[in-house]
Amino acid sequence: MAYQSESLIAHAREVREASDMSQRALSERAGLTQSHISQIESGKMEPGLSSFIDMTRALDLELMLVPKKLVPAVRGLIKAQATPDMHIRTGHPDNKRFARAERLVKKMKQLDGSSADLDRIEETLRFLRRVNLSDQEMQLVRELIVRLERYQANAQADPVVRDIAQSLQRLRNSIAHASPSEPRPAYLLDDGDA
């Protein structure tokens, strides 16, 4: 697979997985076979442009050419307009960390059974993954994920899992219920205009 297309394909796969869409469901929406999508995602096949466009449109994504100089502005607009149900990815290195943490929670649920704390962790991670976190907030999330990885196999993990769930929930609440910043005027008058 060409290096240039690897990140685009990885991005499309992340969006599909974040949407809890199977390859089979994507194949039905895109009009491609499931094995074709599997080969594209695994890097065994370089997708044709029309196949890739069909695949991304089925994921509610749109490919477009943007002048290089405008890429930062477009990314800024996307971040500003993103809503929690939009699966926006801008190549942030923590996306893999979130995905790994979500897989870990699913694994823990399979091994130990579901619990309110694991459900809360899973739901909060999904929310936080779609929010623009400050460096300090992201550092807290990283620390909690590392702690969850460390205690997953421990027989006394219940209090630790509960503490992690509560810490993530507090972070989520502080973000969701943060007081809005002061509104900015749509335009400014010069001193002589008043």
Image: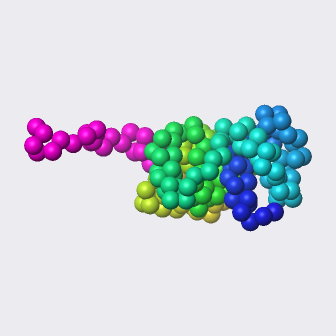
Query: Which stretch did the figure color magenta?
Result: 169-194
Residue 120 shows in this picture: no
Residue name at image x 44 percent, y 48 percent: 171
**In the figure, is residue 62 to the left or right of 139?**
right
Residue drawn 55% across the image and 59% down it:
68
The relative height of residue 150 versus residue 59 in the rendered view (above or below) is below
Residue 83, how many percent across, how many down? Answer: 51, 39
In this rendered view, identify the residue nearer to me: 142 or 51. Answer: 51
Residue 80 position in % (x across, y down): 45, 45
Q: Residue drawn at (53%, 39%), measured in percent from left and top? A: 84
| Nearer to me, 152 or 145 | 145
Q: Is residue 174 covered in magenta?
A: yes
Total numbered circles: 0
Q: Nearer the viewer, residue 176 or 83?
A: 83
Residue sticking out furthest to the top:
29
Q: Quadrant of the C terminus?
A: top left
In this rendering, would 114 be left or right of 186? Answer: right
* Colour scheme shown: rainbow
Q: Where is residue 101 shown, x and y percent of the image?
A: 64, 54
Residue 112 highlighted magenta (yes or no): no
Locate the N terminus and report the quarter of the image it occupies: bottom right
Q: Quadrant of residue 175?
A: top left
Q: Quadrant of residue 115?
A: top right
Residue at 70%, 49% in the rendered image: 12
How far across and how far down the image is residue 23, in percent? 81, 42
Residue at the far bottom in the pictured view: 3
